[in-house]
Image (cartoon, grey):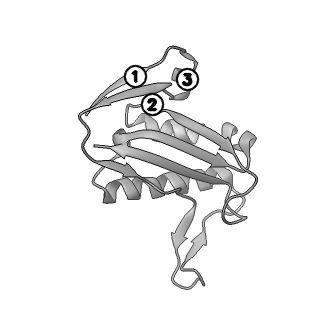
Amino acid sequence: MKRESINPMKWGLNLSIDQGEVLEGGTRHLRCSGQVSLKDDPDAEMGFSVVAPGDLRSQMECTFNNIDDVLQEAKMDRSNIVSIRFFTTDMDGFLKNYDVYTTWIAEAGTKPPQSLIGVARLVLEELLVEIEIEAVS
């Protein structure tokens, strides 16, 4: 797959964001449902439990690990991500911990277009962040 960064405005480059991206040659497209800070827990009523309730940084780290797991199962990696959407109940806290994202995506050598959206609440009250990605290979 060939990627061409589109950046008529340069401010996003310091934040690991391309304003747009032209893709050529991709044949497989992964749309990932919103990933959150959950782990399998066979003893829990719903079969899962929330990781790090109330700790935004730890939830971001766990969520990115969960995205890595989805990518791996799809035989892809971070370099295949072409779009990312962040949803958070704590915009200021997310921005203070944005380095979790930039460190995570840096190894891919890409700057996927992204959106950051503040929401009143996620599916479970303890969750502070949800992340959706799209990937192409």
Examine the rendered structure and indicate whether residue 60 appears above or below residue 23.
Answer: below
Q: Which residue is mark 2?
A: 111
Relative to 61, 32 lies left or right: left
Residue 61, how many percent across, how many down?
Answer: 55, 52
Answer yes or no: is residue 52 visible.
yes
Q: Residue 88 shows which numbered tag?
A: none
Please report contact status of discs 1 and 2: CB closer than 8 Å, yes or no.
Answer: yes
Image quadrant in which the N terminus is located: top left
Q: Which residue is mark 1?
A: 5
Judge the density around disc 3: few (<14), some (14-19), many (≥20) Cα neighbours within 10 Å: some
Front label number (1 vs 3): 1
Disc 1 is placed on an element classified as: strand
Give me the residue at 47% from left, 58% from top: 66
**Type of amino acid at the residue the image marks with label 3:** Gly
Q: In the rendered structure, are the residues bearing label 1 and label 3 in contact, judged by CB atoms less than 8 Å apart?
A: no
- Of marks 1 and 2, the one in the foreground: 1
Q: Is residue 8 left or right of residue 116?
A: left
* Disc 2: CA contacts within 10 A as few (<14), some (14-19) or many (>=20): many
Image coords of residue 10 (percent x, y) = 53, 15
Which amino acid does the dot numbered 2 rest on?
Lys
Which comes before the other along the chain, label 3 or label 2?
Answer: 3
Real-space CA distance between mark 3 and mark 2, rounded to the nearest whole angstrom? 9 Å
Q: Nearer the viewer, residue 122 or 44?
A: 122
Which secondary structure lies at badge 2? Answer: loop
Amino acid marked by disc 1: Ser
Q: Earlier in the sequence, mark 1 or mark 2?
A: 1
The reply to whether discs 3 and 2 touch (Cβ–Cβ < 8 Å) is yes
